[in-house]
Structure formats: C-alpha cells, structure tokens
Image (spheres, rainbow, N blue to C red):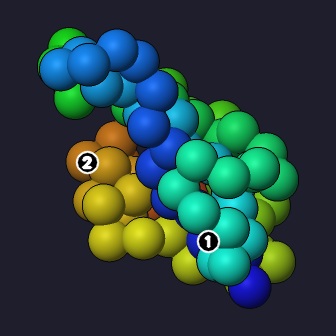
Amino acid sequence: MVKLRLKRCGRKQQAVYRIVAIDVRSRREGRDLRKVGFYDPIKNQTCLNVPAILYFLEKGAQPTRTVYDILRKADFFKEKERTLN
C-alpha cells in the first residue's frame, strides 16, 4: 500500500518537509516512489505537484493526517472537484 507522507529535510531546528509517495513498510527517511510536493512550516510555504498527487490518489494512495491537512489548507480538494466536473 502506498501513502502520501512527509519526509524530513533541512537542518537542525529548521526542518522542511517533502511530501512523497512511499510504501507503508518504508521508514520515514526511506526510499520514496516519487516526490509530489514540498512544505515549509517556518515560512508557511507549500508547493504541490497536483497531477502527481491526483495520480497516486486515484491509484488508492492514502494521505497521512498531516498531509491531508496540508492539502486541505491549500484548497486541493476544491481544485480536485473542479477538475472532475
């Protein structure tokens, strides 16, 4: 099973995260299938690869709770509804 989860990058006390599609059996810093976004909690910046995220969600990938909240704040699900209609 594939999940969309955060992968920690950056320096000590200055964490930034990549949003990645990764197998559930892999550890947090393990090998990812594809990088689908970026999140910086300090600067509150989000960069999403919408077609890649849609692809993995259509294939059955489950976002973690934190990734789901990031996608919701970025109005991803409203954008998804517009592309489907």
At horizontal 80% and vertical 61% (from top left) the residue drawn is: 55
Q: Quadrant of the N terminus?
A: bottom right
At horizontal 66% and vertical 41% (from top left) the residue drawn is: 36
Left or right of residue 48, residue 11 in this image: left
Q: Position of residue 76 (x, y in %)?
A: 45, 51
Sequence-wise, the earlier of marks 1 and 2 is 1
Badge 1 vs badge 2, beta-carbon distance below 8 Å: no
Q: Amino acid at mark 2?
A: Lys
Number of marks drawn: 2
Dot 1 corresponds to which residue?
3
Q: Is residue 46 visible?
A: no
How many other residues sit within 10 Å of disc 1, few (<14), some (14-19) or many (≥20)?
A: many
Q: Position of residue 34 (x, y in %)?
A: 79, 45
- The foreground one among 28 and 37 is 28
- The foreground one among 85 and 4 is 4
Q: Quadrant of the C terminus?
A: bottom right
Above or below, 8 relative to 14: below
At horizontal 26% and vertical 19% (from top left) the residue drawn is: 12
Could you say whether the residue bearing mark 2 is in a helix, strand or loop? helix
Above or below, 49 relative to 2: above
Above or below, 28 relative to 38: below
Q: Which mark is residue 73?
A: 2
